[in-house]
Amino acid sequence: MKLDFVHDLQAVYRKMVDSTSRPGQLSSLAREAELYVADNEAVCNPSLFIIAHTLLDQEVTFKVISAQESLITTMINELTYARPADTKDADYVFIVGDAETGSLQEAISSANPGTLSDPHQSATIIAEVDKLAINGPLTLTGPGIQTSVSVTVSTPEHWVNSRQEKNKEYPLGIDLMFIDASHQLLSLPRTTQITELG
């Protein structure tokens, strides 16, 4: 059975919307990832390719940060016709798990926060992490969260302060999505406030 690039990607898009409208909710892309791997060579987390398929087209730009940057960039370009760009200019930034430590912080600092007249033209960063889980040291509050929710984003990166600095002048800022090895998706829009215990 193969990934259906209409119905399955529509399902992925709905999961991404649900995760974004309810920060702290984990969505599973495991089924779609398994279907994708059945028909494609996996050079990195297949969920990243599925998200790229869902979000990218010839009208947008992207940046890949990875030890296999050239290969993955070529693959995404051929699959979606989106154009590669530098981090500061890219609409979407994909950070693969093999990227050097510090890449996420650097991408957050460099990414386009939009402008006051066009805040929606800011970047979205999609980063691969080791594990995501409900409950943990990060407490989330804000729109879409009834009171608060806590999560774990298992990564050696220290990204929370960089994100808070980047998003301090709302509506300017960047949106974050994380995907883990089990194909769980966590979305953190710029409106979500994060408090880090410890």
Image: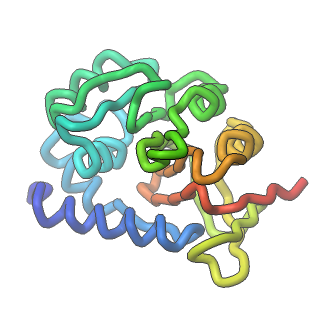
The residue sitting at the front extreme is: 117
What residue appears at the point 63 percent right and 69 percent down from the top-left corner? 134
What residue appears at the point 52 percent right and 49 percent down from the top-left corner? 175
What residue appears at the point 38 percent right and 67 percent down from the top-left corner? 17
Relative vertical location of residue 10 with respect to residue 96 in this rendering, above or below: below
In-front residue for pair 94/84: 84
Q: How is the image coloured?
A: rainbow
Quarter of the picture holding the N terminus: bottom left
Relative vertical location of residue 64 with respect to residue 184 in this rendering, above or below: above
Relative to 124, 145 lies left or right = right
Q: Residue 64 lies in what quarter of the image?
A: top left
What residue appears at the point 36 percent right and 22 percent down from the top-left corner? 85
Relative to 82, 146 lies left or right = right
Relative vertical location of residue 11 with respect to residue 148 in this rendering, above or below: above
The residue sitting at the right extreme is: 198
Q: Position of residue 57 (x, y in %)?
A: 19, 41
Q: Position of residue 158 (x, y in %)?
A: 73, 38
Q: Position of residue 8 (x, y in %)?
A: 18, 63
In-front residue for pair 146/78: 146
Relative to 87, 137 lies left or right = right
Q: Position of residue 49 (x, y in %)?
A: 29, 42
Give the total number of marks visible in the rendering. 0
Relative vertical location of residue 152 with respect to residue 126 in this rendering, above or below: below
In-front residue for pair 34/63: 63
The residue sitting at the top extreme is: 70
